[in-house]
Each structure stands twice: as C-alpha cells, then as structure tokens.
Image (cartoon, grey):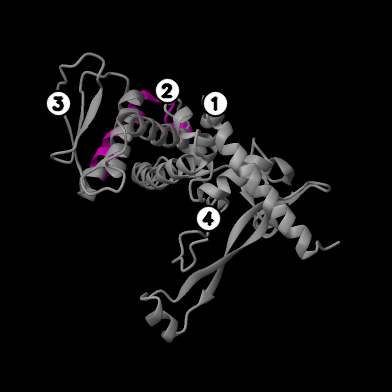
Amino acid sequence: MARTKAEIKAWEHEMAQRATEQLSALADTQKFKQYLRQNAAFHGYSVRNVLLINMQHPNATRVAGFKQWDKLGRHIRKGEHAIKITMPIVKKLTPEEQVKYKTTAERAIVGYRYGSVFDVSQTNGKALLSATDFIKERLGDHQNVDRLYHAVVDAINTEGHVKVSEAPIDEPGVRGFFRLSTQEIVISPQETDAAMKLKTLFHEYGHSQLHGIGQAFADRPRAWKEAQAESVAYIAMQNIGIDTGDYSLGYVATWAKDPKVMAQALKEINEASVHTIELSDQAAQALGFDQAQTTEATLNDAPEQTTNLNSG
C-alpha cells in the first residue's frame, strides 16, 4: 500500500532526527571506525547516504537496486526491507538552461528523491567477486604492497599537485610528513613495513588535499587535521583490505559536540578519501591487481558525480 505524503514527510523527519543522533554517537571511536569502513565500501556516495545506509543496515557492504541485482544474477529475498537512500533527479538541460546555470553539461541534477536499495546479505544467487577481492589477494604478498606503494607515489607525482620523495627523518617515530611551504610529502626510507609506508603516504596525501596551500581547510586546529588525515588513510587502506591497527582518531569526540561541525568534518574527509581511493585504484589497475571477471563494480557506483544544480 502506497504511503501518503504526510507519512512520507514523517519518515523523512524521523530520518533527519536519527541522522543528527548518529552524528553524536560517532564520538565513540569504534562507531566512527565503522562509519569509515562503510565510507570505504560506498566511497562514491555522499556523507548523507553513507549515514542513511549505516542507520538502516549497519553491516551493509554492497548495495544495489532490484534491476542491478537482477543483472548480476541475484534476487531480493522475500520479506526483506529496503534501505532508503537519496537519489538524484537528473534532467536534460535546454540550451537556455545551460546558459542560465553557466554549464556545458547536457544533463544535471535538479533535485533528490528517496529510492530503494538492498544489501548483498539480503539477496540470494550467484556468488560475487569484486576488483577489491582480487586486490586483497594480491596484497597478501609484501612485495606487491611495496609495488602498490611505489605506483601510488608515481601517480601522485604525475598528478603534479604535490611532490613525493623519500629522505631520512631524524625525529624518532615519525614515518613521514607533509611540508606545506613546498607542497611536498616526505616518507622515511627506514620504514621496512610496506603496509605502514603506504598508510603513511595516504595520511600525508590526505593532508595535502585538505590542508595544503589555498585549501579551504588549511586553518583547522592541528588535532583536527591529524584526525582527518588518519581518517582518509583508514578509508584508503580499508579499500584495499588492509587495517594496520595504528590509527589515532581522538579528535572525533570534539567534533561530535556540534552536529554541524561533525557533518562538515565528515564532508571534508569524504571529499579527500574519494580522490585518494580513485588514485589508489588506478595504481592497482596499472599493476594488474584488479583483474576481476565481474561487473560488480557497478554495485556501488553512486550517481552523485553528475553536475549538481541543487544544493539539497
């Protein structure tokens, strides 16, 4: 039976209220790490949709709609409840609208609606493998982690916004740093753990994206910056199936005192981690680490990268 407009509005209000409550709950480090793990799993999605998925299905790992699951040979089990997320309303722009909105895009997001997706755990059917599964398998070899580290270094240097180099660091316990004045990431060659070097690289690259020259978030307190950079590194390492267990996210409790501050911090982390994961995935692809015989990559493709004419 279709819901009335009043029922839909009441549900939307409840979701908004629960989202605010969840932001406060993220002050707990373990809950925050759970959020970051889902951010890695759904790195194409907005903060709002990651929170919505987390609220309704905390253990979700791969979500898709009816048609997507059907194409992959899987079917929704009877009685399963849908996960509601916001989906963009995409409109083809007229020449006049392109001029009005100062864009050359042929299509753009003009609003949002709620749509239904289901987690893989709510389905039956063909077994799924993903590119990430193949990357994880390859990274069981220390040498392959080292190869990925060097491939990511090359990708960052090719990108050109920041330079990565290795040089001895005298300060005890410091594996790397981002030098703001020269826009340079320096990694210690003394670190023999390839996974730790890669994690350090992701951490410092997070700093360069969020706190570099001209960046909007460069004036954040030091502890804020460190927690953000650690979050980006955590998400990027989770994306390739590695958890070094060495993460300090203590500033999260301070963020959570103000839901607006927490939402902004998460938005900034999301923006930086999306780009970091894309760069890491491209490096893994160049090494042949993602040779998965599957179309599963379409599962978590979020349609939120389209030109957006609506701030909602």
Number of other residues with Cα within 10 Å of mark 2, as a class: few under 14, some 14 to 19, many 20 or more: few
**Which amino acid is tagged 1?**
Asp
Query: Mark 1 against mark 2, which lies toward the viewer?
Result: 1
Is label 3 in contact with label 2 (beta carbons under 8 Å)?
A: no
SS type, badge 1 = loop
Can you identify the residue that label 1 sits on?
A: 28
The residue positioned 36% from the left and 25% from the top of the image is: 195
Number of other residues with Cα within 10 Å of mark 3, as a class: few under 14, some 14 to 19, many 20 or more: few
Main secondary-structure element of the magenta-colored stretch: helix
Q: Quadrant of residue 200?
A: top left
Q: CA distance from mark 3 to mark 2?
A: 23 Å
The boundaries of the magenta stretch are 136-155
Can you identify the residue that label 3 sits on?
A: 167
The residue positioned 86% from the left and 61% from the top of the image is: 1
Residue 39 vs residue 188, the one in the foreground:
39
Q: CA distance from mark 2 to mark 4?
A: 28 Å
